[in-house]
Image (cartoon, rainbow, N blue to C red):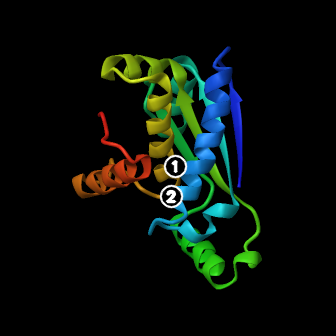
Amino acid sequence: MAVQIQKTVPGHLQEQAWLQRRAQRLIRDLSGFQVPGAAALKKAELSILLTDDGHIQMLNRDWRGKNKATDVLSFPQVEGSDLKVLSKAAKESPRSVPGWWLGDVVISVQRAQAQADEHGVSLKDELETLLAHGLLHLLGYDHEKSRADAIKMRRLETRLLGRTMIH
């Protein structure tokens, strides 16, 4: 599995290297969960963009029609039915599944720092929470669909992070 980190904000070299390793670990952990595409996640590739509120606001406006900054955005490259096909193929013949692009996660470091301060956690903890949230969106989970979907997604985030969620 390959994880690429890009950034539009200066600094955060320590967080960048750590986040790349953490993303690989989260994907590996997710591959053992009963989620769409789980069996094929070991061959997935992921891009993470660390940016600021202004850039994420522009992306949120252009892609979701919401003209406001947010903490994390996800841009999946594979739909749910294709995830199931990939997973089935990986279970039947793991070597037959080629590398594939899971998608892109965009995180506002500016927003992450503000939320970390608000919740009394480290920036790394907040980045990890946002990354887990973004990964689940890439796998088709959507907390905005219904309360039941929000609960399901929150439970998966908690399980994935191995800690109690702070917000």
Q: Is residue 23 left or right of residue 127?
A: right
The answer to whether residue 37 of the structure is visible from this angle is no
Residue shown at the point (59%, 44%) measured from the top left: 23
The residue type indicated by label 1 comes to: Leu
Q: Position of residue 152 (x, y in %)?
A: 30, 57
Q: Is residue 155 left or right of residue 139?
A: left
Q: Are marks 2 and 1 in contact (CB under 8 Å)?
A: yes
Disc number for residue 139: 2
| Secondary structure beneath label 1 | helix
The residue type indicated by label 2 comes to: Leu
| Secondary structure beneath label 2 | loop
Query: Residue extending furthest left?
Result: 147
The answer to whether residue 133 of the structure is visible from this angle is yes
Image vertical order of residue 102 relative to residue 115, above or below: below
Image vertical order of residue 53 relative to residue 165, above or below: above
Residue shown at the point (53%, 43%) measured from the top left: 74
Q: Quadrant of the C terminus?
A: top left
- Check disc 2: other Cα within 10 Å, few if <14, some if 14-19, many if 20+: many
Q: Is residue 81 left or right of residue 40?
A: left
Disc number for residue 48: none
Q: Where, by quadrant of the figure, is residue 68 drawn? A: top left
User: Alpha-carbon distance for marks 2 and 1?
Assistant: 6 Å
Q: Where, by quadrant of the figure, is residue 55 drawn? A: top right
Disc number for residue 135: 1
Q: Position of residue 44 (x, y in %)?
A: 67, 58
Residue shown at the point (71%, 55%) measured from the top left: 1
Residue shown at the point (65%, 39%) measured from the top left: 20
Image vertical order of residue 16 relative to residue 158, above or below: above
Query: Residue extending furthest front?
Result: 162
Q: Position of residue 21 (x, y in %)?
A: 64, 41
